[in-house]
């Protein structure tokens, strides 16, 4: 075992021990289902803001985005622009109302404040759904798409362990899943949120240190620009049109249309309105009054981190003489090439942090959907709180095992898996949730139609586009459009109840009061 690997083992060991310690600390404070799912709604602004970042920007930020920029250049940066706009928009438009509405909306079956712990239960209560289809369909969508989303993190985890330790995918995924499941099962939402704060700091510092080292080695920004342009002038084009040809080992022109690159990139921002693992932070924050500060912290972190990740992709183009066989390894490769083994161990641990920070949040939300919206809603509504808590813990393990199977036996990149799940959540839930908190007359029929249309289109679009249409357009665009159309067209099949109207007015008044 060489010096670099020894330092990596040491830093990984310290990092993983710290995550488990936080899990044990949170275990003592997790005594109810509400604590396990939403931490008792007690997150402060810093924890909520940074946890939202860490739960969102997973291995995609440190592996997927730099890899995409490495392959296609500046055209891929539109994804970062779209995400920055969408993230800010979700904090401003959705977070305050969702925080208040999920707690105050009347329980559709028993009356009184529902304190909805999941998006599925909120939708059932918000629309006073007599069919219970909203809860069932939304829970199915959450579970299905999270299998792929968690799998994307495990693929990134396997790539990291292979890069550093030469481990095969099976043991690599086994180690990673074991640690994530351990502290998530122990401490639930609190463990996930507080580990996220540590992980967010590690990710951001890693993204800062590597570009500084690399740009210095390249002779400044001029050397970076010249190095990229020497590989292909098209890499610096904002409308794309360039891609790495693995067979030729060089960047070549493509037939991709500029408008498709821009629209598809910006459309990623629409996804923020429907990501359950991010929206859980909005629901779990201490008060709507804490949201402006949390939003400022969160958006600042996100914008700077994505800018640095884009820079990493360009640095890889300029730094390496021979194109990489796996573009998504550009960040780890730069770390090992530029830094001392001790520093490399810490920075590579940051990538592991990125993967874990999203996988744990997603496991928790998927388990909550199975427990709250499956077992409790349809099997045993009067289940003992302690039984629910342990059912949630068991389902965390079950979801993790299913996602591990997809990661091991599937054949897709981190970026592909994330893009698929992101579109599914963004289109399946985004339009429904946004209109649910702003449109008083919206009904369960419109919500159900929008959810099905958006989710189904996100699933089918890639196959349809590849085999028939050939536009190359990201699935989010048609899926969101069809979801909005379906909501408007089918909304009239039901009528808003008196209780729904009263809840809307009550929530609106409370949100405005918090803004004063």
Image: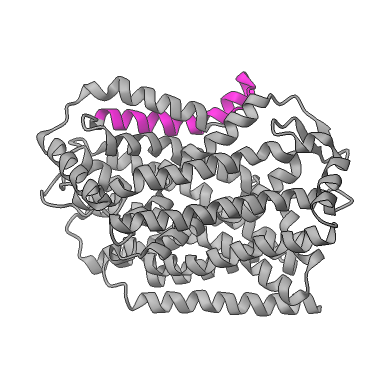
The residue under the point 36% across, 65% down is: 44
Q: How many labels does the image show?
A: 0
The answer to whether residue 250 is visible is: no
Residue 305 falls in image quadrant: bottom right
Q: Position of residue 50 (x, y in %)?
A: 47, 61
Residue 175 in view, yes or no: yes
Residue 98 percent location from the top left of the image: 30, 47
Percent of width and height locating residue 101 = 24, 47
453 inside magenta stretch: yes
Name the residue located 38 percent from the left edge and 50 percent from the top edge: 279
Q: Judge whether 381 appears above or below 192 on screen.
A: above
Percent x, y of residue 462: 58, 30
For the residue pair 334 and 209, the one nearer the viewer reads as 209
Q: In which quarter of the image is residue 205?
A: bottom right
Give the residue at x 23% y 42%.
Answer: 124
Residue drawn at (22%, 53%) of the image? 103
Indicate the quadrant containing the N terminus: top left, top right, bottom left or bottom right: bottom right
Task: From the viewer's perspective, tell me whether residue 198 is left or right of residue 245.
Answer: left
In this rendered view, identify the residue nearer to me: 116 or 314: 314
Q: Which of 90 and 463 is in front in this view?
A: 90
User: What secondary structure prevails in the magenta region?
Assistant: helix
- Position above or below: 451 against 147: above
Q: Is residue 502 magenta?
A: no
Question: In this picture, which residue range is highlighted in magenta?
Answer: 445-473
């Amino acid at each position: 075992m060489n010096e670099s690997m020894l330092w990596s083992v040491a830093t990984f060991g310290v990092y993983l021990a710290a995550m488990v310690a936080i899990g044990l600390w949170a275990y003592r404070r997790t005594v109810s289902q509400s604590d396990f799912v939403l931490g008792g709604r007690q997150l402060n602004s810093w924890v909520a803001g940074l946890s939202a970042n860490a739960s969102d920007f997973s291995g995609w930020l440190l592996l997927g985005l730099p890899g995409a920029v490495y392959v296609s250049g500046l055209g891929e940066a539109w994804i970062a622009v779209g995400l920055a706009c969408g993230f800010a928009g979700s904090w401003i438009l959705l977070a305050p109302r969702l925080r208040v509405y999920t707690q105050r909306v009347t329980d559709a079956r028993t009356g009184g404040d529902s304190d909805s712990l999941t998006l599925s239960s909120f939708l059932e209560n918000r629309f006073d759904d007599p069919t219970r289809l909203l809860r069932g369909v939304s829970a199915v969508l959450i579970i299905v798409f999270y299998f792929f989303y968690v799998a994307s993190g495990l693929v990134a985890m396997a790539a990291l362990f292979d890069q550093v330790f030469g481990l095969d995918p099976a043991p690599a995924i086994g180690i990673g899943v074991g640690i994530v499941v351990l502290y998530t099962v122990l401490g639930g939402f609190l463990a996930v949120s507080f580990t996220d704060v540590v992980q967010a700091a590690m990710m951001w510092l890693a993204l800062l240190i590597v570009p500084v080292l690399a740009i210095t080695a390249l002779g400044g920004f001029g050397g970076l620009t010249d190095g990229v342009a020497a590989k292909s002038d098209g890499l610096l084009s904002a409308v794309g049109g360039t891609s790495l040809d693995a067979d030729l080992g060089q960047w070549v022109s493509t037939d991709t249309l500029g408008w498709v690159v821009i629209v598809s990139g910006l459309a990623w921002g629409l996804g923020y309105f429907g990501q359950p693992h991010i929206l859980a932070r909005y629901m779990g924050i201490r008060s709507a009054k804490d949201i402006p500060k949390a939003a400022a912290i969160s958006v600042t972190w996100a914008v700077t981190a994505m800018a640095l990740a884009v820079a990493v992709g360009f640095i890889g183009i300029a730094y390496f003489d021979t194109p990489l066989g796996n573009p998504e390894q550009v960040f780890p490769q730069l770390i090992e090439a530029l830094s001392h083994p001790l520093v490399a161990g810490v920075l590579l641990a940051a990538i592991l942090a990125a993967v874990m920070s999203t996988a744990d949040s997603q496991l928790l939300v998927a388990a909550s959907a199975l427990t709250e919206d499956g077992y409790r809603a349809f099997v045993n509504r009067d289940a003992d709180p302690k039984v629910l808590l342990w059912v949630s813990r068991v389902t965390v393990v079950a979801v993790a095992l299913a996602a591990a199977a997809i990661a091991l036996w599937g054949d897709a990149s981190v970026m592909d898996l994330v893009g698929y799940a992101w579109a599914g959540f963004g289109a399946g839930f985004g339009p429904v949730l946004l209109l649910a908190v702003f449109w008083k007359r919206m009904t369960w029929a419109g919500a159900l139609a929008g959810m099905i249309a958006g989710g189904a289109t996100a699933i089918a679009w890639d196959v349809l586009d590849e085999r028939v249409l050939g536009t190359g357009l990201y699935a989010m665009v048609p899926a969101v459009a069809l979801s909005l159309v379906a909501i408007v067209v089918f909304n009239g099949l039901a009528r808003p109840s008196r209780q729904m109207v009263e809840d809307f007015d009550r929530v609106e008044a409370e949100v405005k009061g918090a803004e004063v």
